[in-house]
Image (cartoon, rainbow, N blue to C red):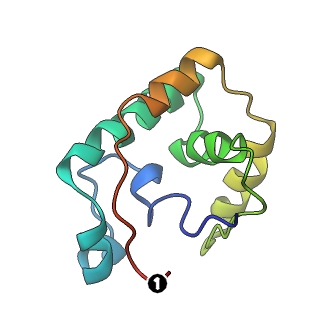
Amino acid sequence: MIPWSPLARGRLARAWGEETERSQSDPFGARLYRQDDRQIVDAVAKVARERGVPMAQVATAWMLLQPAVTPPIIGATKPHHLDDAVAAVDLQLTADEIAQLEEPYHPHAVAGFI
């Protein structure tokens, strides 16, 4: 499996209310996420804060733990995006951190192209 948009269009790389030019001009992205997804973003932020690393590293490290995942499409548009992706390879999440990240997740219906 090759994850597409593993950082959820940047949602897992910044605080829930933080806006970017993309988030303000992405009508497809606006349909993908619900208010209850904030709990997931908050969990990623908490683990990142406790670890002293960017949220993108935590989210990517979790994704790389999934057995079906092969190289993800990270969509880097800035040099630090590559730095975070590389650093995530060495970030070892604890079982407690993994549980914190997974607990608030509720599946979404398939969106986009299948």
Horizontally, residue 52 falls left or right of residue 88, namely left
**Residue beneath the point at 67% across and 41% down:** 61
Provide residue 78's location: percent of width, then percent of height. 61, 71
Q: Nearer the viewer, residue 83 or 37?
A: 37
Q: Is residue 52 left or right of residue 21?
A: right
> On the image, numbered disc 1 is attached to which residue?
113
Is disc 1 placed on a helix, strand or loop? Answer: loop
Q: Residue 45, image x and y in percent?
A: 42, 35
Q: Is residue 67 visible in the rendered structure shown here?
A: yes
Q: What residue lies at 27% left-to-right and 62% top-to-bottom?
A: 19
Nearer the observer, 113 or 48: 113
Residue that extends furthest to the top in the rendered view of this protein: 96
**Furthest residue to the left?**
35
Image vertical order of residue 6 relative to residue 46, above or below: below
Q: Residue 26: in sight, yes or no?
A: no
Q: Residues within 10 Å of mark 1 (few under 14, many from 20)?
A: few
- Looking at the image, residue 19 sits to the left or right of residue 71; the answer is left
In this picture, is 114 found above or below 69? below
Residue 86 left/right relative to 19:
right
Count the numbered circles shown. Answer: 1
- Residue 63: % across, % down: 64, 47
Q: Where, quadrant-wise, is the N terminus in this rendering?
A: bottom right
Quadrant housing residue 87: top right
Q: What kind of residue is marked 1? A: Phe
Residue at x 69%, y 67% (from the top left corner): 2
Nearer the observer, 96 or 51:
96
Compared with residue 80, is residue 17 higher up or lower down, i.e. above or below? above
> What residue do we see at 67% from left, 26% from top?
93
Q: Position of residue 65 (x, y in %)?
A: 71, 40
